[in-house]
Image (cartoon, grey):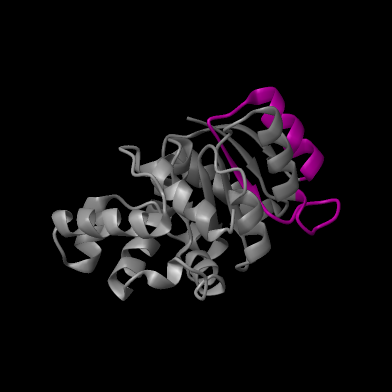
Amino acid sequence: MRIVLAEDLYLLREGLIRLLEAHGFEIAAAVESGPELQRALVDLRPDVAVVDVRLPPTFTDEGLQAALAARRQVPGLPVLVLSQHVEQLYARELLADGSGGVGYLLKDRVFNAEQFTDAVRRVAAGGTAMDPDVIAKLMASNSRDEPLAALTPREREVLELMAEGRSNAAVAQRLFISEGAVGKHTTSIFTKLGLTASDDDNRRVLAVLAYLNGS
């Protein structure tokens, strides 16, 4: 699996390269600025991009904007964004087009190698890997909106775990309920949100996230 990595801090960039290579990933390019990132993504078309939000030259949202620009040229390009803090605007921008694998993790999660590499693989496969703190803030910001407010507390728990990209089996294990119960909650969630059910779990999660984004 080929990765384009964007991180301006040398030590963190080198650490990520070693971690990813140790888990069988190929680093197609490792860059440190927004312009370099956009060129690498368009020219190399990797299986997934792992991108720091804040890159030179502006140190604002250069990394995210470069990734979004590349997605416009390479539709569906999987992008996993890394950020120091939960920034709802960046999460919303990433989720806006609802196509291709997307992820938004806090950098603290990188120190858990298994969790981080699992997120990279999930996004590369077209799924989602949203940090629990990001999901909580997105949901809280929409907590008064209908029909989200119609969800039961259990349905909200299921939705949060689904939005993280977890399978029905993983949700069932986390909540100590059966997979059948998760399926019933999922059906109810999509009915209340007015979303058409699908056999493609990843697309369903993306649709939920797009809804929570207000699109």
Q: Residue at x 61, y 43 (%)?
A: 97
Q: Relative to 4, say whether 179 is above or below.
A: below
In the rendered image, residue 48 lying in the magenta stretch gets the answer yes
In the rendered image, residue 61 lying in the magenta stretch gets the answer yes
Q: Relative to 67, say whether 104 is above or below.
A: below
- Residue 29 screen position, x and y as percent: 65, 33
Decide which of 33, 173 is in the foreground and name it. Answer: 173
Q: Residue at x 78, y 37 (%)?
A: 36
Decide which of 57, 136 is in the foreground and name it. Answer: 136
- Residue 111 screen position, x and y as percent: 48, 60
Q: How many marks do you count on the picture?
A: 0
- Residue 16 screen position, x and y as percent: 56, 48
**Left or right: 204 in relation to 61:** left
Q: What is the residue that sits farthest to the top in this orientation?
A: 43
Decide which of 12, 102 is in the foreground and name it. Answer: 102
Specify start and end residues of the magenta stretch as a single range.
Answer: 33-62
Decide which of 49, 108 is in the foreground and name it. Answer: 49
**Left or right: 96 in relation to 188:** right
- Residue 12 screen position, x and y as percent: 62, 54
Q: Relative to 79, say whether 182 is above or below.
A: below
Q: Residue at x 70, y 23 (%)?
A: 43
Q: Is residue 172 visible?
A: yes
Q: Is residue 13 visible?
A: no
